[in-house]
Image: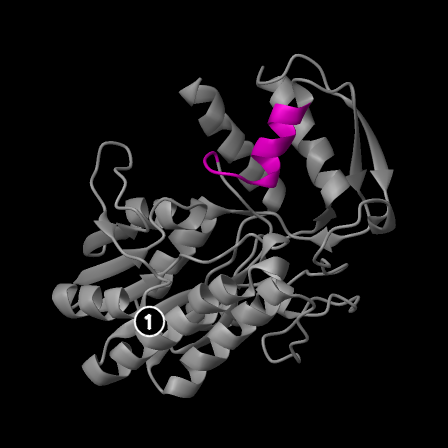
Amino acid sequence: MKILLTGANGQVGYELWRTLQYIGEVIPTTRTGTEIAGMPTVTLNLSDAADIEKKVNAIQPDIICNAAAYTAVDEAENSQVIAYTINSDAPAIFAKYAVITDTRLIHYSTDYVFSGTSSQPWLEDDKCNPQGIYADSKMLGEQAIIDSGCQYMIFRTAWVFSDRAHNFMNSMLKLAQVNDELNIVDDQIGSPTWASSIAMATAMTLRNPVDGLYHMTSSGKTSWCGFARRIFSQAEKLGLIDRIPKINGIPTSQYPTPASRPSYSVLDCNKLKSTFDIKMPNWQTSLQLCMQNIRRQN
């Protein structure tokens, strides 16, 4: 089995590269073809339709795993063309190829497709109501795949963290080194999800794939402030930081951003469990394992 993987240098993409090796031959692609951990990658520019078509026709994959995305949520408000090109147009091109060649397409989406005004975990068939350009572009990418008629599995995830790349956990660890006090938003609720958990769950679905849209996040929920407190608690125990800064929980109104964030983006993952018998791990346990990896690397 040949698997074309996009975004191999991203959080989820890198973990997929490592995990999917046990399923088939993985062809990792990145925007610049940069080596990762000493391994070469294929250059693939998702903002160039001709390049996408050229590469998929040359590689002829059995599975396309699209882990790449334009994820700069705030910058997307002023970079609409590139956001829609990568998050909407590129998935549509992959889907078109998948229909013609009977290829399966795996795609990752986001909790941001919802308004965030609910107080109950979001279901897959709840109405989407994106509140920004990034969110809207991701929703349109989902719809393009579904409308194409190709074989697909779309996995919505949220609050992704890992021991590499830019994410909330790594930002907190850096800020703790230079700040005695931090103000962290405490009224946005979600489920921090380890990139490694996403990769492992994806691999499990490929044993007996079933087309559809699924939610794939850690179990449990917290606020950004609660997430930060847990990060610092674990980091101190592992010797990753010298002391825990004082944490002040603040409302979203005191931390304005160009793009709005969902106030409640907990996703219901029961469909994933009932279809594939996959139960996602608790976010606290995943965080501990991730941070232990960081400790070993240091």
* In this picture, residue 110 sits left or right of residue 120: left
| Residue 242: image location, x then y, percent | 66, 12
Q: Where is residue 266, by image quadrant?
A: bottom right
- In which quadrant of the rendered view does residue 215 lie? bottom right
The amino acid at mark 1 is Leu
- Relative to residue 5, is residue 126 depicted above or below? below
| Placement of 256 over or under 247, stated as above or below | below
**Residue stretch rendered in magenta on the structure:** 163-175
- Element under label 1? strand
Residue 256: give x, y in percent of width and height.
79, 49
Task: Report the side of 266 relative to 291 (left or right).
Answer: right
* Vertical placement of residue 290 versus 242, above or below: below
Which residue does the numbered mark 1 point to in the structure image? 105
In the picture, which quadrant includes the C terminus? top left
**Magenta region includes residue 65:** no
On the picture, is 17 further left or further right than 136?
A: left
Q: Position of residue 76 (x, y in %)?
A: 58, 58
| Quarter of the N terminus within the rendering | bottom left
Which residue is at a point 69% across and 39% down the rendered structure image?
227
Q: Badge 1: few (under 14), some or many (20 or more) residues near its Cα, within 10 Å?
A: many
